[in-house]
Amino acid sequence: MIRAHHDSVLSLEAHGHAGGDLHVSLRGRLGVNQLPEFQTAIARVLKELAPRSVLLDLSRLDYLDTSGAMAVKIWAAAPPQDLAVRLEAGQSRFRDMLALIDVDQVRKPAINPDKRDAGMLEGMGQSARRMGEQIGQLLAFVGQATKSVLMVVARPATLRMGDVLAYMQQVGVDGLPIVSLIGLLLGMIMAFMSSLQLKSFGADVYVATLVAVAMVRELGPIMTAILVAGRSGSSFAAEIGTMKVNEEVDALTVMGYDPVIFLALPKVIAAVLMVPLLTLFSIAAAIMGGLIVGVAGLDLTPYTYLNESISSFDAGDLMTSMFKAAVFGLLIAVIGCQKGFTVEGGAAGVGKATTSAVVAALFLIIVTDSVFAIIQYYFL
């Protein structure tokens, strides 16, 4: 028999013979402060007797907290030597506590694992790998969405038109005030700043042309897309991500629904339809902002300002702008939904996906706008 007694709170008694069956009984308290004592004492007993099996008896403990129960169960699941281990909890409250602990869940890596300091080359490699994985996931989702669109074309009744209208209101009607306000302020700023230069050349009237051309060809679609990405793209990712965490997406799949048709397509259709309309309002608001500055500060008449604005662009410019806005809306909705479907890890995962959706959408909007600029310059 081996006794490992400590005057503090934990003692250990071992009954058995070397190489045989061992009965280890714990007494006193086993909490977070006694874990080092437990690990040291049990390691010493195993080293001295080298048993073939161990019965760890907790029935004489006076106190056992979650940390102690977790340490005992993890040790029993993976003892330091190749031996058979049994636990004897004794009291019902100890049995209940041990039953609540899932060793497999405890061994899972943390959502935010500790990050060691990686070297520059390793960091670049990890970033490239993550980017490749994200591109692969996005392409897989695009393929799945394309398949779902074809299914909707074949069976239009599978599309929930009520959801499409609801998201059109969320993206378009609810976003109209902020888009119009930003457009108005942007038009006033451009008119004011350009007038400081053009006024000295007596070319005040060209302020209207500058504001209109800038808004129609570039700033209108891109500013609207940025606002929608921050407001609605993040909302799409958070909504689907929360459903994914709560296993509602899995429930839809089990019930025979296609989650992409049920959750993603209404959002995508609403964004593609509403972002061009919001862009129109943004352009109109910017022209109104410029008109206020032109009439109040440059002594231009409203007729002159509006006539110069409208004559500065043609229908082709406006159609190209609307097409760009529709593509931006498609990117925002697809990325938001795709990020939502990839959420893992609870609330932290939802927050991470929301941020990632906005960043990825803004990046792709800028890249796509650059491609449009090159195409317009060289081919149109």
Image: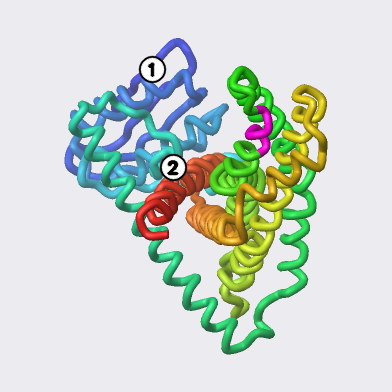
Q: Which residue is mark 1?
A: 5
Q: Is residue 92 visible from the viewing direction of this image?
A: no
| Start-end of magenta stretch | 204-208
In the rendered view, does 4 fall on the left or right side of 279? left
State the image coordinates of residue 357 (x, y, percent, origin top left). Answer: 52, 47
Q: Is residue 73 visible from the viewing direction of this image?
A: yes
> Mark 1: which secondary structure?
strand
State the image coordinates of residue 30 (x, y, percent, origin top left). Answer: 49, 26
Q: Nearer the viewer, residue 348 or 205?
A: 205
Dividing the picture into quarters, in which one does residue 17 lie? top left
Which residue appears at 77% of the width and 62% of the height? Answer: 166
Looking at the image, is 190 positioned above or below residue 254? above
In the rendered view, does 66 fall on the left or right side of 172? left
> Mark 2: which secondary structure?
helix
- Quote the CA–CA distance across marks 2 and 1: 30 Å
Q: Earlier in the sequence, mark 2 or mark 1?
A: 1
Q: Which residue is mark 2?
A: 106
- Quadrant of the frame with the C terminus: bottom left
